């Protein structure tokens, strides 16, 4: 399996942390934020289920900017073979 060594940037990690603490963030945003934070400072890869969720969020033109930012980070850290 090809390992993806990308990590969440400090800027996206900061946004993700705020999303997790926000009562106004959706469940989707909190899921993506948790995944992005898990990948900050580590070489952990996005799981297939989370990758699928993030990909669908990016495909949806009505997704809010926060959702698209988190989804983009999560997708970029997925397994290269998927």
Image (cartoon, helix red, strand yellow):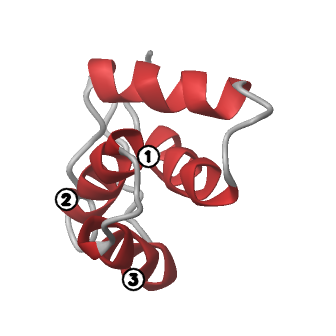
Q: Residue furthest front?
A: 24
Q: Nearer the viewer, mark 1 or mark 3?
A: 3
Q: Is residue 72 left or right of residue 26?
A: right
Q: Could you say where residue 69 lies in the image, as x and y percent from the top left? A: 60, 57
Q: CA distance from mark 1 to mark 2?
A: 10 Å
What residue do we see at 27% from left, 66% from top?
A: 20
- Report if the CB atoms under discs 3 and 2 are less than 8 Å apart: no
Q: How far separated are the C-alphas under marks 1 and 3?
A: 14 Å
Disc assigned to residue 40: none
Check residue 38 in the rendering and tell me which mark sits there, or answer none.
Answer: 2
- Residue 5 at what x, y percent from top left? 35, 54
The front one of 58 and 10 is 58
Crowdedness near tag 2: few (<14), some (14–19) or many (≥20) residues, C-alpha within 10 Å: some
Q: CA distance from mark 3 to mark 2?
A: 12 Å
Q: Check disc 1 and report the residue beneath it.
A: 74
Quadrant containing the C terminus is top left
Sooner in the amino-acid sequence: mark 1 or mark 2 = 2
Residue linked to disc 3: 14
Quadrant of residue 21 in the image?
bottom left
Residue 61 drawn at (x, y percent): 80, 32
- Determine whether 49 is above or below 3 in the image: above
Residue 56 position (above or below residue 33) = above
The answer to which of 4 and 40 lies nearer the viewer is 40
Residue at figure coordinates x 32%, y 29% from the top left: 50
Query: Earlier along the polypeptide chain: callout 1 or callout 3?
Result: 3
């Amino acid at each position: 399996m090809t390992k993806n060594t990308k990590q969440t940037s400090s800027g996206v990690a900061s946004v993700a942390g705020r999303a997790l603490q926000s009562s106004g963030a959706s469940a989707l945003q909190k899921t993506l934020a948790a995944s992005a934070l898990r990948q900050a400072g580590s070489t952990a890869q996005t799981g297939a289920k989370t990758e699928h969720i993030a990909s669908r969020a990016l495909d949806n033109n009505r997704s809010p900017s926060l959702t698209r930012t988190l989804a983009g980070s999560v997708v970029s850290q997925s397994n290269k073979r998927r």
